Each structure stands twice: as C-alpha cells, then as structure tokens.
Image (cartoon, grey):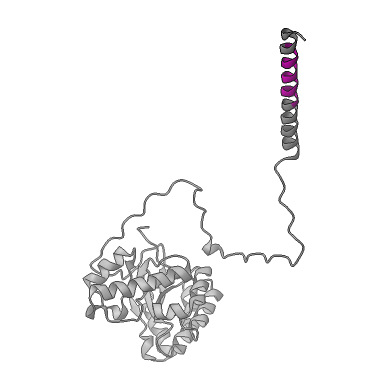
Amino acid sequence: MKKDQLLTRRRALLAGAAAVGAAGTAGALAVALRDGPARPVAPAPGSPAHRPLKPSAYRLQPLTGYGAPRAAPARTPVRSEPILRVSGRGRTMLLTFDDGPDPRYTPDILDTLAKYDVRATFFVCGEMADYNRDLLSRMADEGHVVGNHTWSHPLLTSLGRRRIRSEMERTSEVVEQAYGEPPRWFRAPYGAWNRAAFQLGAELGMEPLAWTVDTLDWTTPGTGTIVDRVEDGAAPGVVVLSHDAGGDRSQSVRALRSYLPELLDSGYHLTVPRRRYV
C-alpha cells in the first residue's frame, strides 16, 4: 500500500474515533440534563432515624453567610456605675432573679413566667449553673436572658483583679456552653462594684445591671411583704431584684404568682434588657 493511502486511512480512523467519543460525551450530557442530579441512596433497612427536635423560635439564629454583612461588634464601654433603670416605651419593667439556678425553685418560677408569656433575666452563679445546665437550656428555649453573677458569689471589693477575672470567666464559659451564647450582662454580688469589676466585665463584653426595687426576699419577710414591695415600687423603667436560689425561696415563688398577673393587669410590659452595644 502506498504511503499516501496509509496516511489517508489513518486520518479516517482518527476521525471516526473522535466522532464516537463526541457522541458518547453528548449522550452522557443528555442523560444528566434529562435525569437531573443524582438521587441520594436510600437508607439501609432498619429502625428509622429520630427526627431532631424543633428548637424554640427564641434560639433560631440566621446562618452564617446569609443576609447583609454585619459590622464588627462595638466595644463594650467601661462604666463607672451600674445601670439602675431601663428605657422603653410605655410602662416597661424588668424582673430579675439572682443566685440560681436551683432545681427546687427555678422550675416553678419558669413555669409561672411561661403561664403569662413573660421573659425575665436570671443572673446565675457559675457553680450553680454548672450543676443545672438543663435549666439554662430551658431559659434559652423560653426566651429569658442569662447574666453573669460570678462563680461563687464573693464580695468582689475584697478580691484582686486575677480572682475577679476568674470568677467572671468561669461563669461565662458555663453559660455559653449551656445557654448557647456568652452572657451580655453582669451583676456584682451584694451590689458591691469596684473599678476592676467594671473594667473586667467590659473586657468580657458585659454591661453592669443593678436594680431599682429590692424585694429583700432573701430575708424571708413573708409572701405578702414581697408582693407589696414589688407593687409599691412598680414604675416605668424599674428593675426588680428577687432570688431563685441561696436559701428557702418558696416565698419568692409564691409572691411571683401573685404580683405578676397584677402587674400585667395594670398595664406593665415585663421584658428583658436590650443592649445598645452588640
């Protein structure tokens, strides 16, 4: 066979192979476009997987990457005194509970708040929160705010900076693990604030919140006395201090059942604090 004939035959074979390859590729693309993306493989036979529990709407957060980009969080200001009152439209008040959570009293308080669809703020001690993380999870599910009340409830004005930082940091870690986010509010035990407490709290991203009306329920003055102190002190912007741990708090539980519906009937809006800096 002559050289020109060999070259002509080789070109024909190569052209035929290319045509076959192109046809195969086109066929594959046609199948992909017709059938759509591959379907997931059916699960193996056996017991059906448990469906995840639907979280409360209060815990739902937008996924990262959706929506407009968020600005960098502003630095928490260092205050020289705690916040005593809150601003808000109308007759707004805050109910706060310190020293818990305590499985003997906190669930009853949460039940009463849920009955009237009211949110409150709980300033928890780390050592109590560590043993009762389920109660912090419930607080998150039901829309309450959890604040930092140190680890062991010491008198901060008698401690050095290192110890104060430890008390705050340990509690913030437990709150973040059980509640789902770090605390944004801090309350000094006994209301004893100092410069170090304000500075360290701000470094941890927390605002200092005190109170306007002290029920003195820790003295167990009687359910009626606690009710009278709350109702007599009620006013727009008031922050009420009560306790859900640290002793016998059965009077505090009963008092809440009495004064909460009275406040609502009087037109008060009971809510949680809002941050100006996020």
Q: Nearer the viewer, residue 187 or 176?
A: 176
* Picture coordinates of residue 259, whole percent (x, y): 46, 81
Q: What residue is drawn where x is 39% and y is 91%?
A: 220
Q: Position of residue 265 (x, y in %)?
A: 50, 74
Quadrant of the rendering where the N terminus is positioned: top right
Q: Measuring 72% from the left and 9% from the top, which residue is drawn there?
A: 3
| Quadrant, the C terminus | bottom left
Q: Residue 175 in the image: x percent, y percent?
A: 43, 71
The answer to if 15 sits in the magenta stretch is yes
Observer-nearest of 186 and 209: 186
Classify 115 as above or below 65: below
Q: Nearer the viewer, residue 116 or 145?
A: 145
Classify 78 as above or below 63: below
Mark yes or no: residue 42 visible: yes
* Residue 271 in sight from this viewpoint: no
Q: Is residue 44 above or below residue 125?
A: above
x 52%, y 63%: residue = 59
Which stretch did the figure color magenta?
A: 8-20
| Membership of 187 in magenta stretch | no
Does residue 192 appear to the left or right of 108 in the view shown? left
